[in-house]
Image: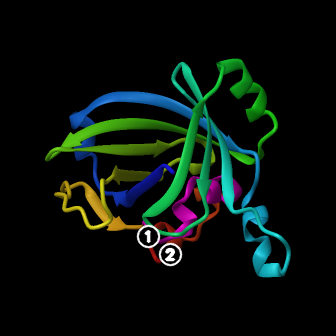
């Protein structure tokens, strides 16, 4: 079973831009929404995984990610034809996520810096995937508050309630 171990941080400043060696435009949508994931709290049967369609440059993927909050989740990622992805994006619920992913190498690790556009413009988040939950890594000086355990920074939540609707406290990293 594929396991993703990922930590997520807010980005401060622009220092990462000059270090980016690749930028990929991404569009993604979800075939289920946050309400379907949260149904269990209301006594209904809840979905246990998000189902995402992503177009990344000229490639497309169907992705399933288990619901766990935090840095470790099950993740399944399957390439699909680009036209299928476009058609599936038309079936997505909630808003679409539009972003530019910048790839930045730092101290032997690859950082993915997501610069959000559209309804999530102004939000910039950096993620690092690790081989183990306790792996040691050096934080670049442009990495700020860790938001790994804050669900509102998950893309599924951003599709449901975009950054444009957040309060100043939420935008300031108030966890």
Residue placed at 19% from the left, 58% from the top? 137
Residue at point 51%, 23% (across, down): 57
> In x, y percent, where is residue 96?
68, 42
Label 2 crowd (10 A; few <14 / some 14-19 / many >=20)? few
Pointer 2: what residue? 169
Residue at x-position 32% and y-position 36%: 103
Q: Is residue 151 magenta?
A: yes
Quarter of the image for residue 140 reads: bottom left
Mark 1: give few (<14), some (14-19) or many (20+) Cα within 10 Å: few
Position of 140 relative to 133 (above/below): above
Q: Which of these two is toward me, 169 or 147?
A: 147
Q: Is residue 80 above or below residue 113?
A: above
In reply to whether residue 165 is colored magenta, the answer given is: no
Q: Is 92 on the left-hand or right-hand side of 73?
A: right
Q: CA distance from mark 1 to mark 2?
A: 5 Å
Query: Which mark is on residue 172?
Result: 1
Across and down, in percent, residue 112 comes to 36, 43
What is the secondary structure assignment of the residue under circle 2? helix
The magenta-colored residue range is 148-161
Circle 1/circle 2 CB separation < 8 Å: yes
Q: Position of residue 121 (x, y in %)?
A: 53, 47
State the SS at label 1. loop
Q: Is residue 84 left or right of residue 66?
A: right
Residue 17: x %, y % from top left = 28, 38
């Amino acid at each position: 079973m594929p396991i993703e171990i990922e930590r997520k941080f807010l980005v401060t400043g622009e220092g990462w831009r000059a270090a980016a060696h690749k930028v990929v435009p991404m569009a993604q949508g979800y075939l289920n929404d946050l309400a379907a994931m949260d149904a269990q709290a209301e006594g209904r049967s809840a979905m246990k995984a998000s189902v995402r369609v992503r177009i990344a440059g000229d490639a497309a993927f169907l992705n399933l990610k288990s619901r766990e909050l935090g840095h470790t989740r099950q993740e399944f990622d399957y390439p699909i034809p680009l036209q299928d992805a476009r058609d599936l994006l038309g079936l997505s619920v909630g808003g679409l996520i539009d972003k530019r992913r910048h790839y930045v190498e730092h101290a032997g690790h690859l950082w993915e810096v997501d610069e959000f556009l559209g309804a999530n413009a102004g939000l910039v988040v950096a993620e690092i995937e690790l081989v183990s939950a306790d792996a040691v890594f050096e934080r670049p000086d442009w990495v700020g508050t860790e938001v790994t355990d804050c669900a509102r920074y998950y893309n599924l939540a951003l599709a449901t309630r975009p950054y444009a609707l957040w309060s100043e406290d939420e935008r300031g990293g108030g966890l």
